[in-house]
Amino acid sequence: MSERMRVLITGAAGFIGSHLARRYLDEGAAVVGVDNINDYYSVELKETRLARLADEDRFTFVRGNIDQQTFVDDLFEEGAFTHVINLAAQAGVPYSLEKPREYITSNIVGFMNILEACRHNDIRHLVYASSSSVYGLNETMPFDTSHHTEHPVSLYAATKKSNELMAHAYSNLFGLPTTGLRFFTVYGPWGRPDMAIYLFTKAILEGRPVDIYDGGLGRRSFTYVGDIVEGITRTLRNVPEPDANWSPNSPDPSTSSAPYRIYNIGNDQTVSVNEVIEMLEGITGKKALRNDLPERRGDVRATFADISALERDTGFRPQTSIEQGLESFVAWYHEYHNA
């Protein structure tokens, strides 16, 4: 299938996007990557990720903003894409407290432009990034896609929930097959410098205190990036169809009478922040210095992914343990930073 695919990946200079582009290129697909290379975090890191893809004849990179309608329309007109994976977004919960308008522009306006372009260009399947943050105040564990998600605790989460609703409208109105993937705390080589495991590793190796919120008791479904990429590729092949069993009298929010699906994609095991730090101490051979801080606004105490629906429909299960993933990340960190 991949050799006949022409895939658009937005956010291709990003952490997940660059890994995903590499996977599709290795499988023989033609890939067009889009990114605006903003300075939310290291531009050098983003450019180095892209450099790893640049020697492929089947990879084309286009720099631009998906919140610009003309740019997106021209991109689709010239691209002749068969499939679209939308990963471009303004990420990060804390930053949404400082720059809320950037989240509306990128995550809402940008996604609207992608939906419109998919609608008018006969895209076979749109897969897009949602987030475990949509579960918000929900404390029923594990998080199930049938749970309601009407109480986000950050603007970032609200924009991701909005993406799911917008996608459903287009699936319902225009028959556009869409699948939203709620990512759970992704980590691994080439990861974002603002993410916890990167920050912990950097601080430990540099002998600086590690900022630890809420006593390190928070638990997450930490998910290795290689597992995420595997799940995305399986999902893209699994084009949704209207669910014949869907009932408007007892509606399941993860499916529909339209060609629409929502899945959790993550590790179905949870690990506390304290446990992660202990593992990093063992891998690096250095003791972490703690800077204990109160709970951070916009954070949730725990995430825990129920991935049974994704496993049922695609056969996906994460294969990388947290210990293996952390060892891989630390090895990459040493190599990249010559630490």
Image (cartoon, rainbow, N blue to C red):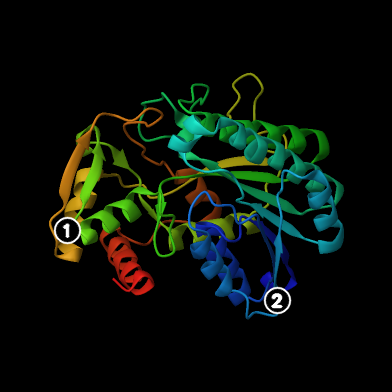
Residue 281's disc is 1
Tell me which residue sits at (34%, 48%) in the image.
196
Tell me which residue sits at (57%, 36%) in the image.
160
Q: Nearer the viewer, residue 19 or 97?
A: 97
Hey, which quadrant is residue 282 in on the image? bottom left
Q: Cα distance, mark 1 to mark 2?
A: 41 Å
Return the x and y of residue 110 as percentages of the image width and height. 70, 42
Q: Nearer the viewer, residue 205 or 86?
A: 205
Residue to which mark 2 is pinned:
58
Q: Secondary structure at mark 1?
A: helix
Of label 1 and label 2, which has the lower sequence position? 2
- Please determine whether, in this image, residue 307 is positioned above or below residue 256: below
| Amino acid on which the number 1 mark rests in the picture | Glu
- Please determine whether, in this image, residue 168 is positioned above or below residue 235: above
Tell me which residue sits at (41%, 41%) in the image.
306
Image position of 285 (left or right of 19): left
Return the x and y of residue 239 as percentages of the image width and height. 68, 52
Q: Secondary structure at mark 2?
A: loop
Q: Nearer the viewer, residue 289 or 17?
A: 289
Image position of 79 (left or right of 111): right
Return the x and y of residue 86 as percentages of the image width and height. 65, 50
Q: Is residue 255 visible?
A: no
Return the x and y of residue 111 as percentages of the image width and height. 69, 41
Quarter holding the N terminus is: bottom right
The crowding category of the residue bearing disc 1, from other C-alpha atoms within 10 Å (few below 14, some 14 to 19, many at least 20), is some
| Amino acid on which the number 2 mark rests in the picture | Arg
